[in-house]
């Protein structure tokens, strides 16, 4: 899930770090797409934060104060996100977790900054940390970092010769696509086509038909799982033999549901799961091992109940991340 594997751990760290104010409860806002196209992720964020707050409250809360979670549905749109920010500030929140998309996180940033409200998001657009807002804390890698990894993987590991890049028009997707194209070219790779889709348009046949004529050996999709699953299914239906590599926003169980049997063999680039971190913790410098074990342990408590499609990492030179349904 693009709602990173470390969200609960980072939320816990931020919650415990907030200083005490004269109030009965510590108000924590959750800005997320609870309805709309990304409701799967938004509801997961809300449920996870509420679960964590419940666990902390059961232990006495934060400095003697109980956590009160105040959710706001930004519907995955910038306009609703800006409204959410004003609403949460007016309700007196000390910090906000969200939003899911970079577009929504960025639309709310300035309001939180002016109010001195901390905001943490797993939005990956590089622009999120370029405004100089001290209130914003990113808890995921930026697009530029993912782009370098993806480009190296496609050009130097898989040795693709004809790469197609697809994105939608969102801040996240456009930023990731542009950064990946730059990184591919810098690595000596060949981008034969760059196309954009309208999110949630469902029918991608015209674009894919054009792509098929380019005879690609890889398709990198920088958009969200809601389109990625259908894009992959239609790609296979059109008998386009290229490998499908999705950006981190495709790491969601619904990708596999939307793609159906076509999900088999697709690649998704994302941060490691808690199990992976623990399994390979010995390779990390000693002073960081304890921190990583603590972060992973917090998330592992809730990890199994949150996913119904699993991923595995095949370690070696290529470090491939493949979808495996039912494992």
Image (spheres, grey):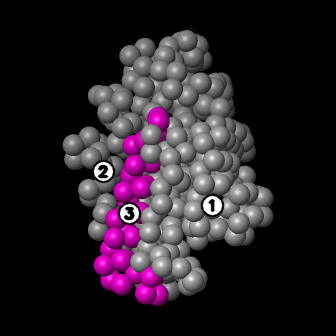
* Upstream in sequence: badge 2 or badge 1: 1
Which residue position is annotated with label 3?
A: 50
Eye-nearest disc, 2 or 1: 1
- Furthest residue to the left? 326
Is residue 104 or residue 259 the one in the foreground? 104
Check if residue 46 falls in the magenta segment: yes
Check if residue 102 falls in the magenta segment: no
Residue sitting at 65 percent across and 68 percent down?
117
150, above or below 230, in the image: below
Q: CA distance from mark 2 to mark 3?
A: 17 Å
* Upstream in sequence: badge 1 or badge 3: 3
Secondary structure beneath label 1: helix
Which residue position is annotated with label 2?
A: 307
Q: Is residue 281 left or right of residue 146?
A: left
Residue sitting at 42 percent across and 55 percent down?
46
Say if mark 2 contacts mark 3, CB within 8 Å.
Answer: no
Q: Which residues are magenta?
A: 36-65
Residue 242 position, x and y percent, is 47, 26
Residue sitting at 62 percent across and 61 percent down?
90
Name the quadrant containing residue 80: top right
292, above or below 192, in the image: below
Say if mark 2 contacts mark 1, CB within 8 Å.
Answer: no
Q: CA distance from mark 1 to mark 3?
A: 20 Å
* Upstream in sequence: badge 2 or badge 3: 3
Residue 76 position, x and y percent, is 55, 41
Which residue position is annotated with label 1?
A: 90
Secondary structure beneath label 3: helix
Say if mark 1 contacts mark 3, CB within 8 Å.
Answer: no
């Amino acid at each position: 899930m693009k709602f990173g594997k470390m969200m609960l751990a980072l939320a816990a760290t931020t919650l415990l770090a907030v200083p005490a104010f004269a109030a009965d409860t510590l108000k924590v806002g959750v800005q997320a797409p609870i309805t709309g196209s990304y409701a799967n992720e938004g509801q997961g964020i809300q449920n996870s934060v509420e679960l964590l707050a419940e666990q902390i409250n059961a232990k006495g809360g934060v400095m003697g104060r109980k956590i009160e979670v105040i959710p706001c549905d930004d519907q995955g749109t910038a306009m609703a996100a800006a409204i959410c920010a004003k609403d949460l500030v007016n309700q007196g929140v000390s910090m906000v977790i969200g939003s899911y998309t970079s577009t929504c996180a960025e639309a709310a940033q300035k309001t939180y900054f002016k109010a001195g409200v901390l905001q943490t998001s797993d939005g990956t657009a590089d622009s999120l940390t370029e405004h100089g807002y001290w209130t914003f804390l990113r808890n995921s890698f930026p697009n530029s970092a993912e782009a370098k990894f993806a480009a190296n993987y496609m050009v130097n590991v898989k040795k693709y010769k004809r790469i197609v890049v697809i994105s939608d028009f969102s801040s996240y997707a456009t930023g990731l696509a542009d950064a990946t194209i730059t990184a591919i070219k810098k690595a000596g790779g060949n981008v034969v086509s760059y196309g954009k889709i309208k999110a949630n348009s469902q029918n991608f046949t015209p674009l894919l038909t054009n792509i098929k004529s380019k005879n690609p050996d890889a398709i990198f999709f920088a958009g969200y799982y809601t389109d990625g699953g259908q894009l992959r299914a239609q790609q296979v239906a059109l008998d386009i033999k290229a490998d499908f590599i999705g950006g981190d926003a495709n790491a969601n169980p619904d990708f596999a549901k939307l793609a159906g049997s076509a999900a088999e063999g697709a690649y998704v680039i994302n941060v490691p799961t808690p199990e992976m971190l623990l399994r390979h913790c010995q390779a990390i410098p000693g002073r960081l091992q304890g921190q990583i074990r603590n972060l992973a342990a917090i998330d592992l408590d809730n990890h199994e109940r949150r996913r119904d499609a699993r991923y595995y990492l095949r370690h070696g030179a290529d470090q491939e991340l493949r979808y495996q349904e039912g494992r």
